[in-house]
Amino acid sequence: MDDTWWPDLLKHIAQEDPWAAPMVTVAEMRSFEGPIDGQRYSSTALIAPADLERLNGELSSFGADVEINGPRPLESEAGRYRPEFWIEAWIEEECLKLEPLILNWESLNRTTLVLDPGFAMTYGLIPRAGSDGSIHWDDPMEPHNDVAIVDAPAVFEAMHLSPTRARVSRDHLQDYLTLRDRVLVQVYMEVRSGAKDKEISAVLGEDQHLDLVFRDRTIVMNRMPDGRYMTQVRGARVLAGPGALPITSRSAAA
C-alpha cells in the first residue's frame, strides 16, 4: 500500500490545498454532522529548513496539536513557572519543540485561538473586536484591514464542537517565513465515521481494527459493532517556505 492511499471517509483531506486561498487557514477546530460525522483539529508549526531536512519526509512524527504547560500551574511551581506553547516533532529520540503560529488553550468547555504576538508585532497589527466575538487584526499604517481573522472560541457541548478557525493573509505569511527563515507546516487530526467505506472494508477484511503508518500520516481504522466504519488520521503537510518578501519589500519601497 503506497503513500497515496486514503480511505473514502478521509479522501477529501488529500485534495485540500490550504495555501491556495488568499487567507490561509492556520488553525481550525470543528465538528461534522450528518451521514459522515466527525471532528477536525488543525494548527501550524514553524520549523527551520535544516530541521525539516533532518526529518527526511517523515512528517508523521509531528504532533497533531499545540502542547501547553497549563493552564493553572501547581502551587509547587511558584517562582519557576514559565508559560510555554509548542508543537512536537520527533527525530528518532530527539523531540523538537516547534513554534506554533496560533496559540490555544482550553478552559472548562471552551477553547480559544490566539494569534502569535510576535507575528502581530512584526507587522504592527492592531486588534479589532467583531460583533460575533471574532478578533480582526489590522495594519493601520497601510492601511490594510483583516490581515488576520480569529474566530470566537470553540464551545464543546453535548458532543458537538462549535467551529472556530484562524486565517492569515498569505502574503504576510510568505513574508514572515522569509524574514524568519522558517517553513510552515500544517498539523492535523480528523475523525470521521460513516455507514460505507469500500476502501476500509477491503483493507480490514475480517479484522475489526488496523493502524497504518505512512511517511506523512497515521491512519487508524475500525469496524464498529453497529456495522459503521470509523477512521482517524493524524498527520502533517508542508504549506510554504522562505521565498519572496511581498510585504517588507513593498514597505521599504514606499
Image: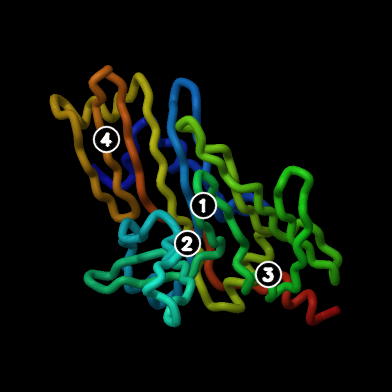
Disc 3, SS:
helix
Comparing 41 with 129, the one in front is 129
Answer whether labels 2 and 1 touch (C-beta < 8 Å).
yes
Tell which circle, 4 or 3, labels the residue nearer the N-terminal end: 3
Q: Is residue 63 left or right of residue 205?
A: right
Answer whether labels 4 and 2 touch (C-beta < 8 Å).
no
The kind of residue tagged 1 is: Ser
For the C terminus, give its image quadrant.
bottom right
Query: Distance of mark 2 from mark 1, alpha carbons?
Result: 8 Å
Disc 4, SS:
strand
Answer whether labels 4 and 1 touch (C-beta < 8 Å).
no
Residue 135 marker: none
The kind of residue tagged 3 is: Ala
Q: Is residue 29 left or right of residue 208?
A: right
Q: Which residue is labeled 3 in the image?
A: 120
Q: Residues within 10 Å of mark 4 (few under 14, many from 20)?
A: many
Q: Which residue is labeled 4 in the image?
A: 221
Query: Distance of mark 3 from mark 2, alpha carbons?
Result: 23 Å
Q: Which residue is labeled 1 in the image?
A: 107
Tell which circle, 1 or 3, labels the residue nearer the N-terminal end: 1
**Number of disc labels:** 4
Q: Which residue is labeled 2 in the image?
A: 71
Quadrant assignment, res 145: bottom right
